[in-house]
Image (cartoon, helix red, strand yellow):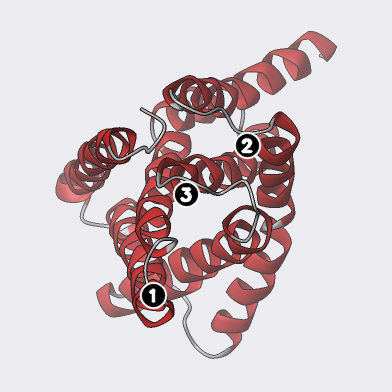
Amino acid sequence: MLENVWLLTALALAPGLAITIYMYRADKYEKEPKRLLLACFIGGMISIGPAIFFGDMFQSLGFSDNHTSISTLLYAFITVALSEEFSKYVFFKRIGYNNENFNEPFDGIIYSVMVAMGFATLENLLYVYQMGFTVAIMRMFTAVPAHATFGVLIGYFAGVAKFKSKVKSKFYLILGVLLAVLFHGAYDYFLMERNYEWMFVGAMFSLYAAIYLSGKAIKSHQMASPFR
C-alpha cells in the first residue's frame, strides 16, 4: 500500500517538475532568482483555494453542468476556466509581474508558468490520490501540459504589457487572461461534452493549438531579450 502511495506521488509530481525544469533551462539569457521562482510555484499551489471559492460561487449563481450543451459550455468556460485562470493570474501579478526582477519579456512567461505548475501539481496530487494510476498517466500528458500552455499565454502578454504604457499594459494583461480562459474552457468543454465521438478529438486539438502557440510565444520572447 505504501509503495503505491509513493508511486502515485512520483507520477503526480513528475510532469509539473519536468516542465518547471524545462522552463528554467529555456530562460537562456538571464536566469531568475530561484527563490522568486519557488515563490511563484508556491503561490500557484495556494491559488487553488480562491479557484475553488470562485468555482463554488459561480455554481451558486447557476453556472453548473446540468448535462445540457449550453450548461456544460458555461460551466467549462466560467466555473472552471475563468475561476482557475483568474486565480492563477492574481498570484502571478502579485508575486511575479510586480517584482523588480521582471526586466525582460520572457520573465512574464517563466513566472506565469511557475504559478501554473504550482497549481497543476497540487491539483494533480489531489486527482491522482483519489482516482489512481490510470488518471496519473493520462494527466501527465494532458492536464498538466495544458496548464503550462495557459500559463504561457498569460505570461507572453504580460511580457508585452510590462514594457507598454499603463493603458496598453492593462489591455495586454486582460487579453492574456481571456485567451487562457478561451483555450482552457475549450479544452475542458470537449472533455465534459457527452458527444464521445468528438470529445477526445476536440480536446486534443485545443491542447495542440495551445502548445503550438506556446512554442511560438516562448521563441518570440527569447529573441526579444535585451540580454542576448
Dot 1 corresponds to which residue? 165
Q: Earlier in the sequence, mark 3 or mark 2?
A: 3
Amino acid type assigned to the residue bearing label 2 in the image: Thr
Residue count near mark 2 (Cα–Cα under 10 Å), binned few <14, some 14–19, many ≥20: many
Give percent across and percent down for residue 131. Answer: 61, 35
Which image quadrant for residue 9? top right
- Mark 2 lies on a secondary structure that is helix
Cα distance in 3D space between marks 2 and 1: 35 Å
| Tag in front: 2 or 1 | 1
Q: Furthest residue to the top?
A: 3
Q: Is residue 59 above or below residue 191?
A: below
How many numbered discs? Answer: 3
Q: Which mark is residue 108?
A: 3
Which image quadrant for residue 32? top right
7 or 87: nearer the viewer? 87
Residue count near mark 1 (Cα–Cα under 10 Å), binned few <14, some 14–19, many ≥20: few
Dot 2 corresponds to which residue? 121
Q: Is residue 3 above or below residue 99?
A: above
Question: What residue sits 30% from the left and 75% below the top?
Answer: 68
Give percent across and percent down for residue 11. Answer: 60, 19
- Mark 3 lies on a secondary structure that is helix
Cα distance in 3D space between marks 3 and 2: 20 Å
Amino acid type assigned to the residue bearing label 3 in the image: Gly
Does the residue at mark 3 contact the one at mark 2 (Cβ under 8 Å)? no
| Tag in front: 3 or 2 | 3
Question: What residue sits 65% from the left and 49% below the top?
Answer: 44
Q: Furthest residue to the right?
A: 2
Question: What residue sits 29% from the left and 40% below the top?
Answer: 224
Amino acid type assigned to the residue bearing label 1 in the image: Ser
